[in-house]
Image (cartoon, rainbow, N blue to C red):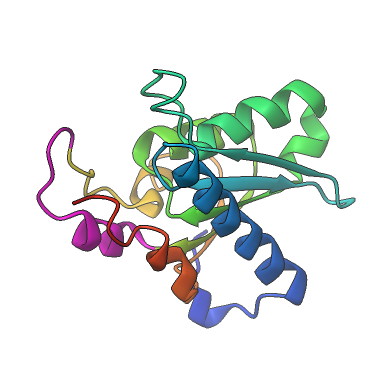
């Protein structure tokens, strides 16, 4: 199942968690990494946070979403992880979507869409952004994952301003 942000009313808590993911993206950027942040929130309100660490840890898989899935899986049992929501500053890439899918997490909420990120990044040195929305990746899975996004949050685009040039 996939839904757009337009058809879902997000709670104030959802919006606060999404804002926190953007704050983590800013922290990642300030630390010298790519500007992405993510959090996992359990059904009972526990929060696990992570940010991108690709540059500082010399790990191309150190995306915020992959990092938060690893951190959450290390401290939560399977049922708590499955019932959690992953909030992220930017739509998860194909690699991160796979990690989220395999973790069992049933809901993803993101701010900046992959299409908008591609527009911001444009032509850059190195590896370009993949044009593969998370909904398309998840459509090939064997279980439903609710996807809410993009959610209009101007700060999610602003954190990328000037970074990719």
| Nearer to me, 162 or 96 | 162
Location of residue 13 by image quarter: bottom right
**Residue 111 versus residue 126 in the image, above or below:** below
**Residue 152 versus residue 77 in the image, above or below:** below
Residue drawn at 74 percent across, 76 percent down: 12
**What is the x, y in percent for residue 160?**
35, 57
Magenta span contains residue 154: no
- Report whether 91 appears left or right of 13: left
| Nearer to me, 83 or 109 | 109
**What is the x, y in percent for residue 25?**
51, 50
- Report whether 124 appears left or right of 4: left
Residue drawn at 40 percent across, 53 percent down: 135
Give the extent of the magenta segment: 113-127
Residue drawn at 36 percent across, 23 percent down: 60
Q: Is residue 142 visible?
A: no
**What is the x, y in percent for residue 84?**
73, 46
Residue drawn at 41 percent across, 24 percent down: 61
**What is the x, y in percent for residue 62?**
46, 27
């Amino acid at each position: 199942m996939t839904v757009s942000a337009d058809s879902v009313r997000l709670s104030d808590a959802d919006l606060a968690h999404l804002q926190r993911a953007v704050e983590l993206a800013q922290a990642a950027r300030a630390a010298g990494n790519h500007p992405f942040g993510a959090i996992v929130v359990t059904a009972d309100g526990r929060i696990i946070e992570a940010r991108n660490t690709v540059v500082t840890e010399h790990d191309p898989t150190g995306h915020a979403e992959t990092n938060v899935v690893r951190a959450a899986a290390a401290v939560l049992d399977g049922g708590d992880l499955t019932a959690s929501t992953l909030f992220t500053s930017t739509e998860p890439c194909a690699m991160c979507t796979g990690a989220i899918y395999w973790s069992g997490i049933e809901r993803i909420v993101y701010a900046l869409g992959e299409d908008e990120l591609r527009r911001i990044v444009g032509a850059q040195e190195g590896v370009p952004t993949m044009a593969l929305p998370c909904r398309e990746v998840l459509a090939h899975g064997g279980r439903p994952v609710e996807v809410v996004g993009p959610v209009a949050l101007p700060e999610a685009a602003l954190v990328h301003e000037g970074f990719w040039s």
